[in-house]
């Protein structure tokens, strides 16, 4: 029985409700009057239900689909401006005891080299990332209580935060590790993590159990209920995601939005981020083995529909996707991207990109500097800001800021100041020239005169006095 306030996975992700939603969407995919009514509701920028959004995703009317895409872009600009937050994944260990059929780290893969970073190696990786200009990391590790216990993860976080190299600091560590206990989530919170990220992979329970035949991840309920335990452990910001291509995309879309509705109903705040990875080639993994792969056109439509359904939520796209797909997705609601990523354990200290321990193929292989310049030439502001997290503006406090449209007076100047740091410390001459012109234009868009004046003073101090880490 569907109940978004329930703490049982089978009730807040109810199979029958999803099936009814998909049938309803099929029945109304050409119902222009209803679709226009749903678009009108979406234009109020307060979100849509999973059923309403599913109708938009199923819609076959070309002109109405175009309106949804235009609205998605408008909503993204309204809530997040033209900022794009930059991050990089850091793979700590590929030891894993699960049997996931879509991941090369699965236990039965005997020809992938297994590796776990020592704390000295973590330090080397972090310095390499700092030398690129990164300030925000998402740490990743396989599930292995012997090789990757929570104590190891906590030690790595402590090491990462302790490293101050030249003008480099990692100011926010997000964590993407397996579902765990309330007690362990509390330890992660005490360690100062930013967002806890866990991809559902698929919301279809039968498919989930088939795709995870062995290991602790086989337990669908324990995995699906992880975000509730994380929030009970004091973690304000959680990030959802499914791995598109494992199951029918419309089923996943409805389940993803139902999960967001559940978090809102129970905890008073929805997901801080939603990620949209797709199945990609990797060692021992052939994406063609999964018959639910989706086209670029459908993929970008999913992004637009998520954006209009959950306007306040950050959206993440990784380097799994090509430059062309990422360019289109940025217009439709994406607010965070990775840059210069390496998905292998120890990959950042290698001169040549290693492939033997990659979790997935990286489609966008440009350097961070190339990605930053590309964004700026397209009038986006690459942001290395971590101010909200460090000022305690997390969970419902961040959402209140976002919903009250105060982004331009807070996140906008913070983005420009962190971009100025990047230009001074890491950028190529061409990137620096493009960035200086962008900052000169964009600082004038800060509405509050007092904030704008202070931001200009801070920008000058970064450029001419060598000062760093200003924030509103």
Image (tube, rainbow, N blue to C red):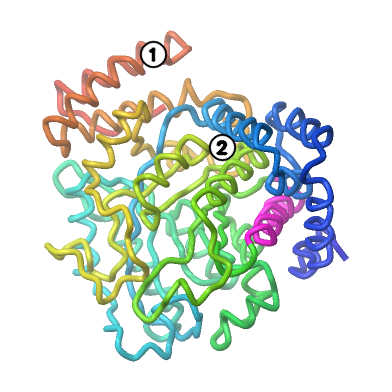
**In whole angstroms, how far apart are the C-alphas of marks 2 and 1?**
21 Å
Q: Position of residue 178 (x, y in %)?
A: 51, 72
Q: Looking at this view, is 11 or 294 the one in front?
A: 294
Q: Position of residue 220 (x, y in %)?
A: 66, 76
Q: Position of residue 401 (x, y in %)?
A: 58, 30
At a point 62% along the width and 25% down the height, the residue shown is: 404
Q: Is residue 369 above or below residue 150?
A: above
Q: Secondary structure at mark 1?
A: helix
Q: Is residue 185 left or right of residue 439?
A: right
Q: Is residue 466 above or below residue 457?
A: below
As for residue 259 lying within the magenta part, the answer is yes
> On the image, which quarter does residue 174 sit in?
bottom left
Q: Is residue 146 above or below residue 229?
A: below
Q: Is residue 167 left or right of residue 153?
A: left
Report the residue that reaches farthest toward the right: 1
Q: Secondary structure at mark 2?
A: helix
> On the image, which quarter does residue 354 sit in?
bottom left
How many neighbours does mark 2 have within 10 angstroms: few (below 14), some (14-19), or many (20 or more)?
many
Q: Earlier in the sequence, mark 2 or mark 1?
A: 2
Residue that label 1 marks? 452
Question: Quick check: can you spot residue 243?
Answer: no
Residue that label 2 marks? 398
Question: Quick check: can you spot residue 449?
Answer: yes
Q: Looking at the rendering, in which quadrant would you find the C terminus?
A: top left
Disc sitting over residue 212 in the figure: none
Q: Looking at this view, is 164 or 219 the one in front?
A: 219
Q: Looking at the rendering, in which quadrant would you find the N terminus?
A: bottom right
Report the magenta residues as a range.
Answer: 249-268
At a point 79% along the width and 53% down the height, the residue shown is: 26
Q: Position of residue 337 (x, y in %)?
A: 39, 46
At a point 63% along the width and 40% down the height, the residue shown is: 396
Q: Main secondary structure of the magenta part?
A: helix
């Amino acid at each position: 029985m569907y109940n978004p306030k329930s703490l049982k996975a089978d009730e807040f992700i109810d199979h029958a409700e999803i099936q009814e939603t998909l049938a309803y969407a099929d029945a109304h995919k050409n119902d222009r009057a209803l679709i226009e009514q749903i678009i009108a509701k979406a234009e109020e920028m307060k979100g849509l239900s999973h059923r309403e959004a599913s109708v938009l995703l199923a819609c076959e009317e070309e002109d109405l689909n175009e309106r949804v895409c235009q609205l998605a872009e408008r909503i993204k600009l309204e809530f997040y401006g033209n900022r794009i937050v930059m991050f990089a994944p850091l793979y700590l260990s590929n030891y894993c005891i699960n049997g996931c059929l879509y991941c090369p780290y699965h236990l039965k893969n005997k020809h992938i080299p297994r590796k776990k970073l020592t704390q000295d190696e973590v330090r080397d990786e972090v310095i390499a990332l700092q030398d690129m200009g990164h300030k925000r990391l998402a740490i990743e590790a396989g599930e292995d209580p012997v090789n990757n216990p929570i104590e190891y993860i906590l030690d790595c976080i402590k090491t990462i935060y302790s490293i101050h190299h030249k003008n480099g600091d990692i100011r926010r560590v997000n964590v993407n590790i397996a579902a765990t206990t309330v007690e362990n989530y509390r330890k992660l919170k005490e360690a100062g993590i930013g967002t806890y990220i866990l991809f559902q992979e698929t919301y279809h329970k039968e498919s989930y159990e088939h795709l995870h035949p062995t290991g602790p991840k086989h337990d669908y309920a324990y995995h699906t209920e992880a975000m509730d335990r994380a929030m009970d452990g004091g973690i304000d910001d959680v990030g959802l995601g499914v791995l598109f291509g494992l199951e029918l995309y419309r089923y996943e879309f409805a389940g993803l939005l139902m999960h967001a509705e559940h978090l809102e109903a129970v905890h008073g705040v929805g997901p801080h981020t939603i990620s949209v990875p797709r199945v990609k080639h990797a060692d021992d993994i052939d994406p063609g083995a999964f018959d639910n792969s989706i086209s670029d056109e459908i993929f970008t439509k999913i992004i637009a529909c998520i954006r209009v359904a959950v306007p306040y939520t950050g959206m993440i796209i990784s380097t799994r996707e090509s430059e062309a797909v990422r360019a289109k997705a940025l217009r439709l609601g994406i607010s965070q991207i990775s840059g210069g990523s390496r998905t292998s354990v120890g990959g950042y200290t290698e001169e040549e990109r290693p492939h033997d321990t990659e979790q997935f193929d990286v489609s966008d292989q440009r350097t961070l500097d190339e990605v930053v310049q590309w964004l700026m030439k397209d009038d986006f502001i690459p942001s290395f800001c971590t101010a909200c997290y460090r000022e305690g503006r997390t969970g419902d406090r961040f959402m209140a800021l976002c919903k009250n449209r105060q982004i331009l007076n807070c996140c906008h100047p913070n983005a420009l100041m962190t971009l100025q740091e990047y230009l001074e410390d890491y950028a190529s001459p061409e990137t620096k020239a493009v960035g200086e012109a962008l900052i000169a234009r964009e600082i004038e868009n800060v509405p509050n005169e007092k904030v704008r004046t202070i931001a200009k003073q801070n920008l000058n101090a970064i450029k001419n006095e060598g000062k760093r880490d200003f924030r509103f």
